[in-house]
């Protein structure tokens, strides 16, 4: 879930990286937070498409790891 705190922390780390640099731990945290943000956006898009009537379809070329329907 994308929260205001998540976005603020991502932005803080981006500013710090630009002006001061980040430690190894901060870089790892930054990547983890960015992945969490991207996953949240992806979920919102999928939910919006599904609620609009688009069904998730898979075929043999799909690389998502799910079995074809």
Image (spheres, rainbow, N blue to C red):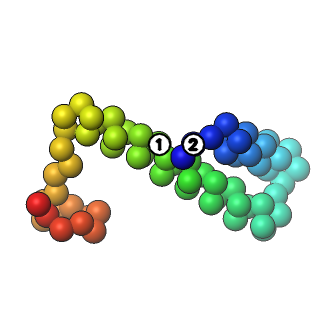
Query: Residue 9 falls in which quadrant of the image?
Result: top right
Neighbor class of circle 2 (other Cα within 10 Å; few <14, some 14-19, many 20+) is: some
- Residue at x 13%, y 64% (from the top left corner): 68
Q: Give the image location of residue 26, x and y in percent.
A: 77, 61
Choose between 19 and 27: the one closer to the eye. 27
- Residue at x 56%, y 53% (from the top left corner): 36
**Residue 19 sits above or below residue 48 on the image:** below
Q: For the residue labelled by badge 1, is the local secondary structure a helix, a strand or a loop?
A: helix
Neighbor class of circle 1 (other Cα within 10 Å; few <14, some 14-19, many 20+) is: some
Choose between 54 and 64: the one closer to the eye. 54
Residue 14 visible from this viewpoint:
no
Residue under circle 2? 2
**Residue 15 sits above or below residue 31 on the image:** above
Q: Give the image location of residue 51, x and y in percent.
A: 27, 35
Q: Badges 2 and 1: C-beta atoms under 8 Å apart?
A: yes
Of circles 2 and 1, the one toward us is 2
Query: In the figure, is residue 35 to the left or right of 66?
Result: right
- Residue at x 16%, y 57% (from the top left corner): 58
Residue under circle 1? 41
Query: Residue 48 falls in which quadrant of the image?
Result: top left
Query: In the figure, is residue 15 to the left or right of 29?
Result: right
Query: Residue 59 falls in which quadrant of the image?
Result: bottom left
Q: Give the image location of residue 23, x and y in percent.
A: 83, 63
Answer with mark 2 or mark 1, whichever residue precedes in sequence.
Answer: 2
Q: Residue furthest top?
A: 52
Q: For the residue labelled by badge 2, is the local secondary structure a helix, a strand or a loop?
A: loop
Residue 63 visible from this viewpoint:
yes
- Residue at x 18%, y 44% (from the top left corner): 55
């Amino acid at each position: 879930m994308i929260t205001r705190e998540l976005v603020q922390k991502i932005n803080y780390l981006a500013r710090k990286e630009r002006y001061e640099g980040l430690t190894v731990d901060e870089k790892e945290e930054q990547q983890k937070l960015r992945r969490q943000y991207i996953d949240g956006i992806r979920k919102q898009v999928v939910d919006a498409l599904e609620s609009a009537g688009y069904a998730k379809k898979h075929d043999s070329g799909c690389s998502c790891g799910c079995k074809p329907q």
